[in-house]
Image (cartoon, grey):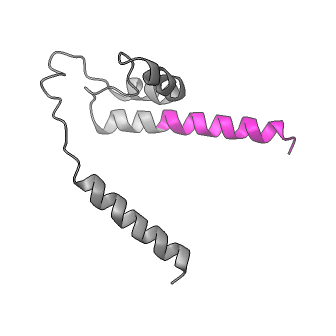
Amino acid sequence: MNKKVLMLLMLSVIVFTVTGCADPVVVTECVVGLPVAGFWSGLWHGLTLPWSFIGQLFSDNIAMWAVANSGGWYNFGFFLGISTIITVSSKTTYAKKGK
């Protein structure tokens, strides 16, 4: 086995072991009465992720995603939004290089 692959595998095992010990936060009491975010909210949150991340660094009132979400459909929309941002930014960067 390649030495780099072995080191990557060892690092992955260490990271997963350490993060597996993290204490989960129960937020059910905090989200009672909040509207549940679905697919369209997930898509919007994915599209605005870069700006939300920057805003979250400076304010506790800004979140990158909705805690009270519908689960799979919200996650799917969020993934599509992030994928769109990455695709558009990579094509823009590629076009600027003139290739």
Q: Is residue 73 above or below residue 20?
A: above
Query: Is 91 a magenta residue?
Result: yes
User: Residue 97: percent from the left, percent from the top?
Assistant: 84, 41
User: Residue 32: percent from the left, percent from the top?
Assistant: 14, 19
User: On the image, which quarter does residue 77 sit in?
Assistant: top left
Query: Is 29 a magenta residue?
Result: no
Which region shows up in magenta? 80-99
Question: Residue pushed farthest right?
Answer: 98
Residue closest to the eye, 36 or 28: 28
Give the dominant element type of the magenta stretch: helix, strand or loop.
Answer: helix
User: Which residue is painted at 51% across and 36% down in the image?
Assistant: 82
User: Which residue is painted at 87% across and 41% down in the image?
Assistant: 98
Position of the C terminus by quadrant: top right
User: Which residue is painted at 43% across and 70% down in the image?
Assistant: 9
Residue closest to the eye, 53 or 34: 53
User: Residue 10: percent from the left, percent from the top?
Assistant: 40, 70
Position of 34 with respect to 8 (left or right) is left
